[in-house]
Image (tube, rainbow, N blue to C red):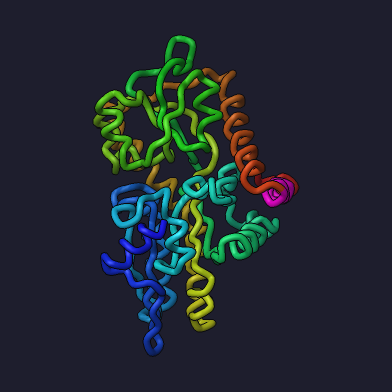
Amino acid sequence: MKRLLTAIAVSGFMLGGLSVAANAATIKILTSWNKNVWPTYVVLDSFVKNVKKLGGDKIKIRISGPEVVPAFQQLQPVKAGVFDILFTHGVYHMGSKGLAAIMDAMNSDPVGKRTSGVWDHLDKFYQKTHGLKLLAISPNSTKGYHIFLKKPLSAKGDWKGRKIRGTQTYHGVIKLFGGEPVVMPGSQVYSALEKGVVDGAAWPAAGMLSMKHFEVAKYKVRPTFGTSTLPFLMNLKSFNKLTKEQQNILLQAGYMTELEMPWVGDQVQAAEDAELAKKGVKITNLPADQVAKMRKAFSAGIWALGEKCCGADAKKLRELAEKAGISW
């Protein structure tokens, strides 16, 4: 990790991240996805636009991605202050207490996460454990995740014996239908499908179009499951260097993004589905009696991951979510 931090500094990213000049602050965001990937071009763009809308020139943003720091190694550079904000998925740092990953076991209701105490508990956890301030925990849409395949489901309605790319959050679903999980960054999925390294992939329900996965996989499994939920986490020292006004701009922009994304994401999803149909992508449906099992396997797997990584804090979030009726 020291080598990584040194390499980043040498390549032009000065340690110390945040710079504040006069009444303007320049904030460095590190994102886990390239510009052509679904979470970045919708969720991150919405956040950046909201910051601009609320703050004008009071906050300037610079964005770097996995071409600078690989997605699974991004937590530490943000904790160290090389970058100010991390836009990611909790599972990418699951091995370092990535509690945010279990938000996928809750629905896309942003208000419910805040009124239930879930948002505040997650914020306190990241501040205490990682020195990071939660700015937002935004859903992609209401559609969550899906599996797409090179070949349709078998006659029995499964993918038994096939290798399916998926981070830990998907493993319960992949194994339920006889698949073998393969972990790899999203940037490698296209070539892995093309070369036959994997037979399908688990992914947010939108993204086949922007990533051109439709060129190497022509079947998407329906229905979808879970909620793809992405945190914006800011180095706490960088956050505390900002003026109260700048802090409020970021927090309000985060909340606006949370509120916008369910319906904005669904619009993007609908447009993508229509375009994919034109390109020959077909739907392969799970048997009706397997749908509930799939969704249960996903949420059970998420909660189990959470308790393994974060113990009592994961149990507390589950308790709050179930009490508020926002868990799957």
Residue 213: x and y, percent?
Answer: 29, 34
Above or below, 257 relative to 228: below
The quadrant of the picture occupied by the N terminus is: bottom left
Q: In this view, does 42 lie to the left or right of 141?
A: left
Which residue corresponds to the image point at 44% horizontal and 57% vertical from the top-left?
A: 87
Nearest the viewer among 74 and 270 is 74
Most extreme residue toward the bottom is 22
Residue 56 percent coordinates (x, y): 38, 79
Residue shown at the point (55%, 22%) measured from the top left: 176
Residue reaching furthest top? 155
Quarter the C terminus occupies: top right
Evaluate whether residue 50 shows in this view.
no
Name the residue nearer the viewer: 202 or 163: 163
Q: Nearer the viewer, residue 2 or 41?
A: 2
Name the residue rendered at 36%, 58% in the picture. Answer: 3
Give the prevailing secondary structure in the magenta stretch.
Answer: helix
Picture mark count: 0
User: In the rendered structure, which segment of residues is drawn in magenta?
Assistant: 312-321
**71 within the magenta span:** no
State left or right for residue 99 relative to residue 157. right
Q: Position of residue 125 (x, y in %)?
A: 64, 59
- Residue 224, image x, y percentages: 49, 33
